[in-house]
Amino acid sequence: MADSSPQHSDAFVFFGATGDLAYKQIFPALQAMIVHGRLDLPIIGVAKSDWTIDQFRERARDSLEKHGSFDAAAFEKLSAQLHYISGDYQDAATYAQLRQALGNAVRPLYYLAIPPSMFAPVTEGLATSGGAQNARVIVEKPFGRDLASAQALNRTLHAAFAEEAIFRIDHYLGKEAVENLLYFRFSNTFLEPIWHRAYIASVQITMAEQFGVQGRGAFYEEVGAIRDVIQNHLLQVMVLLTMEVPMNVDAKAGTAAVQDAILYEKLRVLRAMRPLVPDEVVRGQFKGYRDEAGVAADSQVETFSALRLHIDNPRWSGVPFYIRAGKQLLVTCTEVLVELKPPVHPVFDAGTGHPNYFRFRLSPDVLIALGARTKLPGEAMVGTAASLISHRPPGDEMTPYERLLGDALQGDAGLFTSGEAVEAAWRVVEPILDTTTGTTFSDLVPVVMYDPDTWGPPSADQLMEDGDQWDNPAASEDVRQ
Ligand code: BG6
């Protein structure tokens, strides 16, 4: 079985080296790590294409020019570290070649940037050739299509790697703003007493994208918005907002014991989320989606979904959680709004809506706003809504992929999803997915058409309870104010 010690990996191997993910994310992340002096080890690409090392380097250069702001000095270093193996993933000879290319390396990190159908042959190939020993493996999302396939995938990986050696990527967890949620929650004394059903009226998360499927129609037909971003990215955001305080009496700040406590609490809250019911789900499809390449003329796949979720535990019982994600919406922005209940005995005019809230902007910039009411100048005790804002424009922080690859090389699993957590997240969305029941997904929750450049189908409003309303993020904070 694999070594679970936190020693640094001594080689990086990526399967699917000529593919889209490598082109858009992996090469740019590798270059950035070299620029930051964080990557000095053999980098081996594996793929089927019969390429020479020079062709492979050209591909890397092209990727960096298009996606990674090419840096000549870093590229030179990257080129010198690059190796390329062309081979069939089903063929033992590929793994023998890989073993040879690894040379003296004994703790490789493998990245499976390949279609999920290839995970099993590659894992088996690595295990049979002895390549899984002392190794780590990174697996991309989507991690399965439903609970059963996620469990099967976990079994496949566990046959060759220990859980500690498996790094399931959810790139949202590598975003600064998302980490900031966790930090903000547990580093501020004022929050804990009110972070509770007694004070919080509702929570909503909106992930809006102004663009469509960007040529990924065939991929999107297999997933749809719920599998693409809700089961993973947005449930993870909800977990960070709602988990209990991670406790471990032996833990010192920043240690592995703290991380274990965090993973434990994340899993507990996921398991307290009530599985979805069709009445609390709206699915939409933007008009024009069916004309995209790779999309069926009668596609029932959702490009928008809105859900109402519940957490059945003492902290959150009775608080509605509204989640919404969609393509071709009015802006590109991800925001969380935590609405507080109004004062029980308002002494002054409290205005309309909820007077107090926390708003977290997770993308494209990092912002935390606290909504309050303040008095307007004058004799009358009337007030206005004000926002206390902490705002940081996008800076030179690491991209999620640079951050996550660096962490995996160090054996740091804090920003990755455990096998149990992935399964627990599938359990939440499972009841509305087309799996073993034979009922089709679209029979359960029919897809509703919506116009591009809107906030999706108006029926999403019907999910709101007791006068709650969707809060629509603005493209930029300046516009909002
Ligand atoms: C990906 C989804 O996981 O996340 C895409 O497959 C989505 O459909 C993307 O657009 C959004 O991530 P980010 O970091 O670009 O906001």
Image: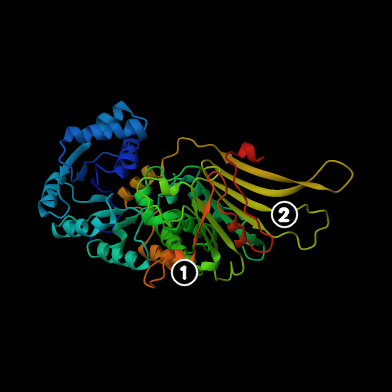
User: What residue appears at the point 31 percent right and 54 percent down from the top-left corner?
Assistant: 139
Question: What residue type is disc 2 on?
Answer: Gly
Categorize mark 1 by other alpha carbons within 10 Å: few (<14), some (14-19), many (20+).
many
In 3D space, how far apart are the residues under numbered discs 2 and 1 (Cα atoms)?
Answer: 32 Å
Q: Specify the farthest residue to the top.
A: 72
For this view, does 258 lie left or right of residue 141? right
Closest to the observer, 119 or 325: 325
Q: Report x, y in % for residue 392.
A: 55, 39
Q: Nearer the viewer, residue 279 or 199?
A: 279
Give the labeled residue for mark 2. 353
Position above or below: 90 against 73: below
| Horizontal arrangement in the rendering, residue 192 relative to residue 135 (left or right) | right
| Quadrant of the drawing holding the N terminus | bottom left
Q: Colour scheme in the image?
A: rainbow
- Outermost residue on the front side: it is 297
Of label 2 and label 1, which has the lower sequence position? 1
Q: Residue at x 15, y 55 (%)?
A: 90
Lateral position of residue 112 relative to residue 287, left or right: left
**x 14%, y 47%: residue:** 87
Q: Secondary structure at mark 2?
A: loop
Q: Quadrant of residue 419?
A: bottom left
Quadrant of the image containing the C terminus = top right
Residue occupying image coordinates x 57% and y 49%: 455
Q: Are marks 2 and 1 in contact (CB under 8 Å)?
A: no
Q: Looking at the rendered structure, which numbered label has been put on residue 271?
A: 1
For label 1, the SS is helix
Q: Is residue 305 above or below residue 406?
A: below
Could you tell me the amino acid type at mark 1?
A: Arg
Numbered-mark total: 2
Horizontal and vertical percent position of residue 265 = 47, 64
